[in-house]
């Protein structure tokens, strides 16, 4: 079914699953893989039959970073002119909620892609880190910004300046991870969460995701105003009327995504 070289894609009901699949390189993000993930995610995002997207890797690695072998020969002008990693802005701008299901290594670009997802489920064996400093460079897919917003300045500095890895307990304590799950149940749990999200009203889900994302882009008063206006707008939805009627009538809502 998949015309992709470096990822597998699958539809499970209303959930789209993207599996990073370069096992010989611990799913290192080369340019083909990056292009394919963004293309597959964009296709799912345009599909009204998809209500959530799961991004996952293997048990050994979500992704061990951008592909160092591919980057090694590049110069400043090469990466500047090609605007390396700018494509990921399209991934960050998806309207469909994205769930990262992370087992094993999530390092460098791998950690950054996981953090670009809306929520992050981690297996007990997951390890997070931004080791770019050990290569003489720095995070390039948003890590210095998203990690700092997720875990605060001190821990972000610790990870980014030393390049050390962080296990799941520390990652959960620091607020990077929504839930830690047994490694063998990771995909199942991620699919359950994604299914739950996909069972809600799609326009309400878009609105909720946009409102939470606004917290990272605005002042508190602007964000609260944005939320209030968006909340008011949900009163134009048939699904909002159905959701409240179903509660009153003590039955399950039948959302039509309208
Ligand atoms: N890139 C390319 N190949 C990789 C990568 C990678 N990031 N990670 C692992 N591999 C390859 C290895 O080279 C090896 O290949 P081979 O068998 O051909 O030698 C294979 O995957 C298996 O890896 P290991 O044998 O090393 O497996 P171990 O279990 O011994 O170690 C580690 C696992 C600890 C994860 C180790 O592989 C490692 O340290 N990997 C690199 C991690 C890293 O530094 N990631 C950050 C990359 S930089 C980045 O993501 C953002 C850069 C932003 C730059 C901005 C520029 C514009």
Image: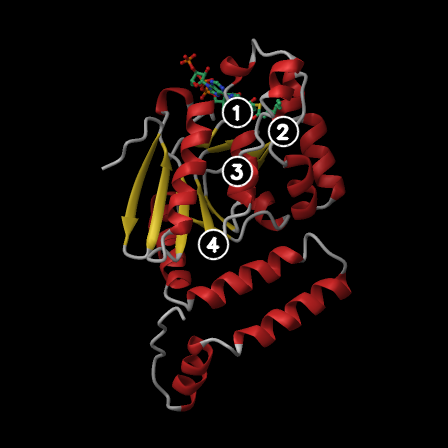
Q: CA distance from mark 4 to mark 2?
A: 23 Å
Q: CA distance from mark 4 to mark 1?
A: 23 Å
Left/right of residue 185 with respect to residue 165 in the rendered view = left
Q: In this rendering, is residue 127 above or below 188?
A: above
Please give the name of the residue rendered at 42% of the width and 68% of the height, measured from the top-left corner.
201
Ligand 1 neighbours mark 3 (CB distance < 8 Å): no
Q: In this rendering, is residue 225 above or below 44?
A: below
**Quadrant in the picture for the C terminus:** bottom left
Q: Regarding mark 1 in the picture, which secondary structure is present there?
A: loop
- The numbered mark, 1 or 3, whose residue comes first in the sequence reads 1
User: In this view of the protein, which residue sits in the foreground, 194 or 174?
Assistant: 194
Q: CA distance from mark 1 to mark 3?
A: 10 Å
Q: Position of residue 29 (x, y in %)?
A: 47, 26
| Residue hosting label 3 | 113
| Residue hosting label 4 | 97
| Residue hosting label 1 | 66
Q: CA distance from mark 2 to mark 3?
A: 11 Å
Left/right of residue 191 with respect to residue 158 in the rendered view = left
- Per the rendering, the mark at residue 140 is 2
**Mark 2 touches mark 1? (CB < 8 Å):** yes
Q: Regarding mark 3 in the picture, which secondary structure is present there?
A: helix
Q: Position of residue 88 (x, y in %)?
A: 54, 36
Q: Regarding mark 4 in the picture, which secondary structure is present there?
A: loop
**Quadrant in the picture for the N terminus:** top left
Left/right of residue 166 with respect to residue 243 in the rendered view = right
- The numbered mark, 4 or 2, whose residue comes first in the sequence reads 4
User: In this view of the protein, which residue sits in the foreground, 215 or 196?
Assistant: 215
Ligand 1 neighbours mark 1 (CB distance < 8 Å): yes
Residue 35 showing in the rendered view: yes
Please give the name of the residue rendered at 55% of the width and 15% of the height, measured from the top-left corner.
71
Q: Regarding mark 2 in the picture, which secondary structure is present there?
A: loop
**How dense is the environment of label 4, judged by Cα within 10 Å: few (below 14), some, or many (20 and up)?**
many
């Amino acid at each position: 079914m998949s015309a992709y070289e470096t990822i597998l894609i699958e539809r499970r009901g209303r959930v789209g699953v993207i599996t990073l699949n370069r096992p010989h390189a611990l799913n290192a993000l080369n340019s083909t893989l990056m292009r394919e993930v963004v293309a597959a995610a964009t296709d799912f995002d345009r599909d009204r039959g998809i209500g959530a997207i799961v991004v996952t890797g293997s048990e050994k690695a979500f992704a061990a970073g951008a592909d160092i072998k591919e980057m090694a020969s590049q110069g400043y002008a090469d990466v500047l002119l090609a605007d390396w990693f700018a494509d990921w802005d399209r991934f960050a701008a998806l309207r469909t909620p994205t769930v990262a299901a992370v087992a094993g290594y999530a390092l460098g670009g791998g950690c950054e892609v996981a953090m670009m997802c809306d929520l992050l489920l981690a297996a007990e064996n997951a390890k997070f880190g931004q080791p770019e400093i050990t290569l003489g460079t720095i995070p390039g897919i948003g890590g210095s910004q998203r990690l700092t917003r997720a875990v605060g300045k001190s821990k972000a500095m610790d990870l980014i300046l030393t390049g050390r890895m962080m296990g799941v307990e520390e990652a959960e304590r620091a607020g990077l991870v929504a839930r830690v799950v047994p490694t063998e149940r990771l995909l199942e749990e991620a699919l359950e969460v994604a299914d739950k999200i996909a069972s809600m009203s799609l326009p309400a889900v878009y609105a909720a995701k946009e409102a939470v994302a606004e917290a990272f882009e605005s002042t508190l008063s602007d964000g609260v105003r944005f939320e209030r206006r968006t909340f008011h707008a949900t009163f134009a939805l048939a699904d909002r009327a159905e959701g409240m009627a179903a509660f009153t009538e003590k039955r399950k809502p039948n959302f039509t995504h309208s």
